Amino acid sequence: MSEKGIFPSRFLFCIMTISMFLLILSSVFLLQFGNTSLLPRSGFKLILVNGTVYLKSNVKNELKLPFFLPESSQADARTPVKTGDLTCHKPNYGKEMCVYRQRNIESCNADQALLRVYMYDLPSEFHFGLLGWKGKSNQVWPEVNDPTRIPAYPGGLNLQHSMEYWLTLDLLSSNTPSAAVVRPCAAIRVTNSSEADIVFVPFFASLSYNRHSKLRGKEKVSVNKLLQNKLVKFLTAQNEWKRFGGKDHLIVAHHPNSMLDARRKLGFAMFVLADFGRYPAEIANIEKDVIAPYRHVVKTIPSADSAPFEKRPILVFFQGAIYRKDGGAIRQELYYLLKDEKDVHFAFGTIQGNGVNQAGHGMASSKFCLNIAGDTPSSNRLFDAIVSHCVPVIISDEIELPFEDVIDYSEFCIFIRASDAVKKGYLLNLLRGITKDQWTKMWEKLKETVRYFQYQYPSQPCDAIDMIWEAVARKVSSVRLRIHRESRYRRYNEHQVERLR
């Protein structure tokens, strides 16, 4: 080819390259410095959660990623958020993100919140009234400004299913002055349901089942059933429910037997559950519902006091009910396989007497703690093991784990199929083959992971409450997808039906 033919080609290529560079550069400056936008008013805001970039509408202030931060902020941004933390597919949650969230804990409003939540002002009989709380005339909610004066939740095994209590408190505290209660910016309560991403139903369903499911005196219907019937009647009459058939509602039913009478009638709602063991797939499933951790009953061991490998004389620990039905029958098989092994503690145990303290001490003295399927696929024992820094060995084929889309449990848990666990010698040979270095890596990861499973008031970044709200937020887009797909033909078809009447 002649030089005359080459020159125009090169010239055009250079012009195109420079033009593209100038276009990209101008777009960056518009995003960074422009007060107006080419997008509509309901433009998008990038929200970074668990290493995932989410799009959120109707937000005034833009979250600027570290590249766009002013110089004074870039150093701070680089410390907590390392390379890879801003990608769309982060492999695990990471302590850096929690540090970043902690630094920004005090700046929170409805525009910055990950979730805007509308909560019904249900009568106290549905929530804190079940704790014996009685407010003043026309007072629906207790004062939550002072954490030392909030109504206490019952102890013992009641605590393990207390999620609705902590979530309700967190929403109430979101409207208190930040100086009184400092909390993360995951969820904010709004007073207008049309502005909400989700509608929260403050019914203490697990407590209602635990305390009021049995008939008392001359009762013909239990208080638990009455409350469920009242709840169904109330919800189905609300415009918020009618709008989308309850698909944007959030109901906490963590105890496997809670909401037994109402769950089918309210099955389009999003549930917060322990597992799906007692739910048909059309009512509860991983696509629309959230799995929340049990509230552990043993004490959390401080990291500094956690015994290392050589100071944990027990190889394998299990203490609890041994004879269970259905999928839990494997406990009995494992008991007969392991009960006579010298470095194994496999015994019946309850919370009665000093049972909880004994279990906590045993877990803290053990290298591995068995989490075996019982009447349902999950149990509180897993979270007791985590806060004891005892490496969990999960033998439950149908188990669903909290926040597994952002937490890689294989980093600190060992999973064994039930069919393998009951083979003679299989379980102990596997565990005895794990080296001190391998175990120590899991132990170190456990100590980092504990924060994700702690329930507390006020909530803190990356604790169980914060993580549940974030899990709900990750479901919101799929909820909207369902609503929008089902609305494809409805609007104009309904108008046509009205015209024909």
Image (tube, rainbow, N blue to C red):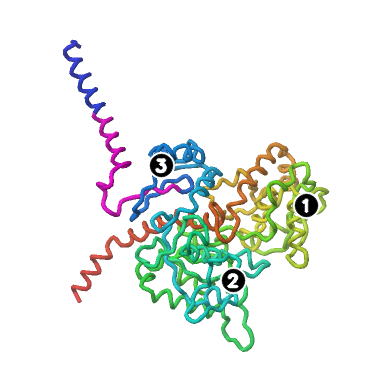
Residue 42, quarter of picture: bottom left
Label ID, residue 338? 1
Horizontal relation, residue 306 to residue 213: left or right: right
Secondary element under disc 1, as helix, strand or loop, is helix
Q: Mark 3 or mark 2, which is nearer the start of the sequence?
A: 3
Residue furthest bottom as drawn: 218
Q: Which residue is drawn at 68% across and 38% down?
A: 438
Q: Which numbered circle lies on residue 65?
A: 3
Q: Nearer the viewer, residue 194 or 189?
A: 189
Q: Which residue lies furthest to the left in this view?
A: 4
Horizontal and vertical percent for residue 217?
64, 87
Secondary structure of the residue carrying tag 3 is: loop
**Disc assigned to residue 151:** 2
User: Which residues fall within the magenta stretch?
Assistant: 19-48
Amino acid under disc 1: Leu
Q: Which of 174 and 323 is in front in this view?
A: 174
Q: Which of marks 2 and 1 is in front?
A: 2
